[in-house]
Image (tube, helix red, strand yellow):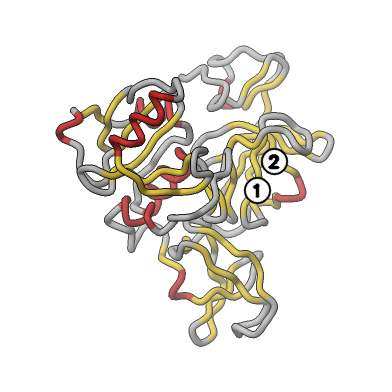
């Protein structure tokens, strides 16, 4: 059982019922399954507007709520296990199980099965939807609108096979701390999204990712491998270049690994801590 507060739904006065006997708390309670009803709900470190965003819950993803107070729900994101606070207005009771995920880098849903109708979103890669009706090339999602079905893929099928190619589709997206949507994401969010699109589970933060994957040597690096620094991660696109969401470019960028190593070292960020293969 991890005591990492990022992954443990417990505090001194309250914890999830499933942690009874595992984490000390004054009381234990059952969680309520909720789902994100906005394109990307910020998951914050504290229950107040403007608190640090540490993750996002994409549309349709589940968030197990333990407490609601002052307009914020405290709970745990089911997909990556992250604990934090989400605005209660961004959540609704979980409905039907998802049938599809968004397979396009981003897409709109429409109020009617027409591209001329009011647009909703945009929804990012890996958002989850439950299709409840179809008309022509459109699929109606529970709690949302009509998606062009070609932009969806069945849950558990039609996965991508090249994580680096998924990352490359984010090229130029703005850097956003705690982000994992296509409109803005951070370094570990980019890696997580790329691997999820390939049907691979992936933790949220860089230290979690570094611990989760097998170590390799630098000469063995190939497309799709990961390079870690203290607090940063990049993905190889070939034997010499990386793609990463980074605060230097404030965007997702491709650049030579050697140049990045030198720049990070010059900025007192140190040398790479490891090389890993997902």
Q: Position of residue 107 (x, y in %)?
A: 54, 68
Task: Classify mark 1: residues with Cα within 10 Å, few (<14), some (14-19) or many (20+).
Answer: many
Q: Position of residue 74 (x, y in %)?
A: 70, 33
Task: List the single residue furthest toward the left.
Answer: 219
Tell me, yes or no, whether the two marked residues, 2 and 1, touch with CB atoms within 8 Å.
yes
Q: Position of residue 67 (x, y in %)?
A: 74, 33
Q: Which residue appears at 34% of the width and 52% of the height?
A: 198
Q: Which residue appears at 47% of the width and 61% of the height?
A: 101
Q: Position of residue 39 (x, y in %)?
A: 62, 57
> Would you say 129 lies left or right of 25 here?
left
**Residue at which label 1 appears:** 41
> Would you say 42 lies left or right of 78 here?
right
- The picture quadrant where one finds residue 166 is bottom left
Task: Classify mark 2: residues with Cα within 10 Å, few (<14), some (14-19) or many (20+).
Answer: many
Looking at the rendered structure, the secondary structure element under dot 2 is: strand
CA–CA distance in space, label 2 to label 1: 7 Å
**Residue at which label 2 appears:** 86
Work out whether residue 182 or residue 121 is closer to the camera in this orientation and state it: 182
Work out whether residue 198 or residue 129 is closer to the camera in this orientation and state it: 198
- The picture quadrant where one finds residue 272 is top left
224 w.r.t. 206: above or below: below
Q: Quadrant of the C terminus?
A: top left
Q: Which residue appears at 62% of the width and 52% of the height?
A: 40
């Amino acid at each position: 059982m991890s005591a990492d507060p990022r992954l443990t739904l417990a505090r001194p006065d309250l914890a999830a019922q499933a942690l009874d006997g595992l984490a000390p708390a004054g009381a234990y309670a059952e969680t309520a399954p909720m789902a994100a009803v906005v394109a990307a709900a910020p998951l914050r470190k504290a229950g107040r507007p403007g608190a640090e965003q540490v993750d996002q819950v994409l549309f349709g993803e589940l968030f197990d709520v333990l407490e609601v107070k002052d307009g914020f729900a405290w709970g745990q994101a089911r997909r990556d296990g992250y604990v934090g606070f989400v605005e209660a207005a961004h959540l609704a009771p979980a409905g039907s199980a998802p049938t599809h995920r968004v397979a396009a880098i981003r897409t709109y849903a429409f109020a009617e099965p027409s591209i001329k109708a009011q647009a909703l979103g945009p929804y990012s890669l890996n958002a989850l939807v439950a299709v409840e009706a179809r008309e022509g090339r459109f699929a109606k999602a529970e709690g949302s609108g009509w998606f062009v079905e070609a932009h969806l893929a069945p849950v558990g099928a039609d996965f991508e096979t090249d994580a680096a190619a998924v990352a490359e589709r984010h090229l130029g997206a703005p850097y956003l701390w705690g982000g994992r949507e296509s409109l803005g994401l951070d370094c570990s969010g980019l890696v997580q999204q790329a691997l999820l699109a390939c049907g691979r589970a992936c933790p949220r933060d860089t230290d979690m990712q570094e611990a989760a994957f097998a170590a390799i040597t630098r000469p063995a690096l190939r497309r799709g491998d990961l390079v870690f620094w203290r607090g940063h991660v990049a993905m190889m696109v070939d034997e010499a270049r990386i793609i990463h969401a980074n605060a230097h470019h404030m965007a997702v960028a491709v650049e030579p690994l050697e140049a990045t190593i030198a720049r990070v070292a010059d900025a007192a960020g140190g040398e790479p801590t490891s090389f890993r293969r997902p």
